[in-house]
Image: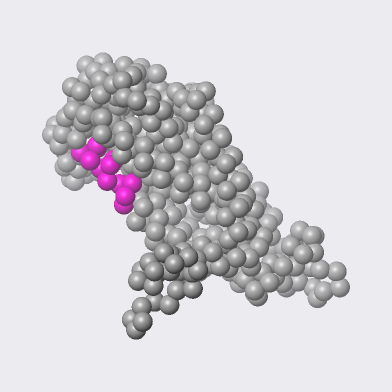
Amino acid sequence: MAGLHKSEFANPVINWIDTRLPIFTMMQKEYGVFPTPKNFNYLWNFGALAMVNLMIMIITGIFLAMNYQPNTELAFGSVQHIMRDVNYGWLLRYVHQNGASMFFIVTYIHIFRGMYYGSYKNPRELLWILGVVILILMMATAFMGYVLPWGQMSYWGATVITNLFSAFPIVGPKIVTLLWGGFSVDNPTLNRFFSLHYLLPFVLVGVIFLHVAALHITGSNNPLGIDVKSPQDTLPFHPYYTVKDSVGICVYLAVFAALVFFAPNYLGDPNNFIPANPLQTPADIVPEWYFLPYYAILRSVPNKLLGVCMMFGSLLVLFVLPWLDTSRVRSARFRPIYRQLIWLWVVAVIVLGVCGAHKPEGIWVILSRVATLYYFLHFLVILPVLGKLERPLPLPESISQPVLGGRGGGPLPGSAPAKPMEKA
């Protein structure tokens, strides 16, 4: 019939829908026959794991919101009501609470994979930038969610973190007042944070849609970091990578379940089991583990304004990473010096996380300053200079060469020598 989309699905119901709204054709194109490099390893599972985790967080969050009371007099009690009286409320809360940690674990691994294999390089700069936006939205959502139980650490964490904006001259105090909805962390603050915590995951879905759309325009990077040369370099996404992702999801859910059922409070703070008390400050105010590296950067600088700027700068520098790395080769497999330095950067981030969990005194201050220095040197000095000086290893002619040859990155027996470099 004129005007209808031509659908090739055999199922009459799917065919009827698809001729009028071709969503099944789109899914088949984007997730069925979509050509994908044939040499993906399991690090490429973590994007799918992050999407699964986000869906889990949204679903459990909706059910928790049905029983939560965003009021300073009722919030702590409503959380206890969810845990004790709501059917499977304890399970919903533990899945949601630990899901935040699992979300950051898979996201941080996903980011590291992008950095190791150069997935931020041309033509994927916008894809990377959208990923950094997703990370920042995740952090804002997680911070506001941590305030909602209205325990001691929730209250004082909100007080300390929102007060950081007061370091900015002129506009700082106004920003703090806007966040608080008054002159202290109180009922308007809790209402604001609850509303934004509920809203931001749906904003996150929108940005992830753009992230995936950008990925499908430019195509995926791969462990070799070279471009697809021919159809022999690719496989259809389904069934090859749907099966591989399914294996990763099963392992991930098993680890997630073990955390939920056997150590649900392992990553939490005992102070948050105490109702919020504005008149009693906890001995140590420590954020959730996934914020500890940034917290250590903040405390490593004696000046409050400079510390806040460096903390935000540690995230903002990721936006310009595609232009800071001047190397023409993407993958660290062919960059022997960079391969060592990226792991040194990972060690620096871990050291910052450990320092953030301790009091800012003694050796922890020295370690946090050294790790902070290397964190910024890696991006602002090492990457621009190293890209000019480092001599990469020879790249294979195509993805199929090392896959079929089984010799790492070397050429097939009897083939022509590999080119020394390929422009990213």
Q: Where is residue 225 in the image (x, y as percent from the top left)?
A: 62, 63
Residue drawn at (45%, 49%), measured in percent from left and top? Answer: 51
Residue drawn at (50%, 69%), measured in percent from left and top? Answer: 10
Quarter of the figure that contains the N terminus: bottom left
- From the viewer's perspective, is residue 19 above or below residue 331? below
Q: Where is residue 249 in the image (x, y as percent from the top left)?
A: 55, 44
Residue range highlighted in magenta? 192-203
Residue at the extreme right: 414
Q: Does the magenta stretch include residue 200?
A: yes
Colour pattern of the rendering: one colour
- From the viewer's perspective, is residue 220 above or below residue 340? below
Q: Report the front residue among 245 and 32.
A: 32
Residue at the extreme front: 12
Quarter of the figure that contains the C terminus: bottom right
- From the viewer's perspective, is residue 294 above or below residue 318? above
Q: Does the magenta stretch include residue 134?
A: no
Q: Report the front residue among 375 and 221.
A: 221
Left or right: residue 365 versus residue 199 is right
Left or right: residue 404 versus residue 152 is right
Left or right: residue 283 versus residue 392 is left
Q: Where is residue 392 in the image (x, y as percent from the top left)?
A: 69, 63
Q: Is residue 148 visible?
A: yes
Residue drawn at (52%, 23%), measured in percent from left and top? Answer: 262
Total residue callouts: 0
* Magenta region, main secondary structure: helix
Residue drawn at (62%, 71%), measured in percent from left and top? Answer: 228
Residue at the extreme left: 182
Q: Position of residue 335 (x, y in %)?
A: 67, 58
Q: Report the front residue among 119 and 4.
A: 4
Q: Can residue 389 be seen in this view?
A: no
Residue at the extreme bottom: 2
Residue 17: image quadrant is: bottom left
